[in-house]
Amino acid sequence: MRILITGGAGFIGSHLCDRLLADGHTVIAMDNLITGNTDNIAHLAGNRNFTFIYQDVTDYIYVEGAVDAVLHFASPASPVDYLNYPIQTLKVGALGTHKALGLAKAKNARLLLASTSEVYGDPLVHPQTEDYWGNVNPIGPRGVYDEAKRFAEAMTMAYQRYHGLETRIVRIFNTYGPRMRINDGRVVPNFIFQALHGQPLTVYGEGSQTRSFCYVSDLVEGLVRLLYSDEPEPVNIGNPVEMTILQFAETINQLTGNAAGIVRQSLPVDDPKQRRPDISKAQRVLHGWAPVVPLEQGLAATVSDFRKRLGLI
């Protein structure tokens, strides 16, 4: 297939490029590099099956020739980013999704939308299932991301129902791995950066809030299966193994040999207290998909990648 990936120079987008090229497809990555980085795809330079287009996807998207699938992954994805770029975050969720859907319709291509567990907000249901409608504050500081993704899902379903477009929606839970931005602002890069510099890890509140962490190769496997599947409605993809942020901090300190411990700061506004996917639907519709990379193994690979990029080895 010939596949366009918006946000293709980002963390997840670049890993998708690698996987789809390895599977024999032709890949076009599109990115405006607000949060993406060409370093993530530099190793693909010279690959005759790969093309990079520098473009903001909120503008009209033109791609010459056939396109069989559009994977819409363009968006700031961390609280630091969408607080720095609130308007751009809303625009890429609304206008960018509209442009991506328009291209898919024009090319008679299948579209896969990268949505997020943040559509569930600070959930009142635990673990989160796809039929839960969420508990989102639309006017809070996180609302620019949460509502952008909720709107993107609504528009994608509208194109599916009104135009008969083949669409897929993934709700991605916390994912980590090599190529995460060092100054991303999310818990994994924050903790690893601090630990590698011998600093205490910053834990917000008591650290009792929970998260689950999925290694990027497990996520990508689920994404590819979803793209090929016949499932038209949202599917959670993430790791159902839940732990507190305090437990996660202790794991990072132990793995890196950091003896500086932790420091506590007050909780950010609307920070979800619990986050864990129910993946029973993914297991059912994606041929038994489930995460296979243990946390310690995935973190070891991620820490090694950070050490290299920080010049610490």
Image (cartoon, rainbow, N blue to C red):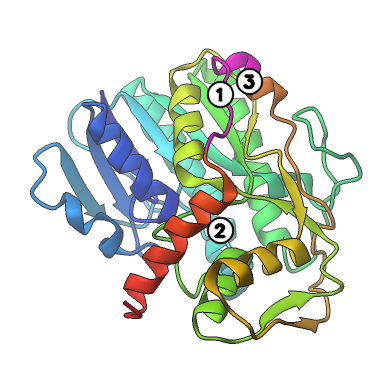
Residue 48 occupies quadrant: top left
In this figure, which residue is indicated by the disc labeled 2? 77
- Dominant SS in magenta: loop
Question: Callout 2: 10 Å neighbours few (<14), some, many (20+)?
Answer: some
- Name the side, left or right, on which 204 lies relative to 41: right
Query: Which structural element holds mark 2?
Result: loop
**Three-letter code, disc 2:** Ala
Instruction: Decide whether residue 285 is among the magenta residues.
Output: yes
Q: Secondary structure at mark 1?
A: loop
Q: Nearer the viewer, residue 273 or 178?
A: 178
Q: Name the mark on residue 176.
A: none
Circle 3/circle 2 CB separation < 8 Å: no
- Residue 158 coordinates in the image, percent (x, y): 61, 27
Report the residue marked by disc 1.
289
Mark 1 touches mark 3? (CB < 8 Å)? yes
State whether residue 288 is above or below residue 257: above
User: Who comes first in sequence, dot 1 or dot 3?
Assistant: 3
Disc on the earlier residue, 3 or 2: 2
Q: What whole-number distance in Å separates the C-alpha atoms at marks 3 and 2?
A: 25 Å
Q: Which residue is mark 3?
A: 283
Q: Position of residue 143 (x, y in %)?
A: 73, 60
Segment tinted magenta in the rendering: 283-292
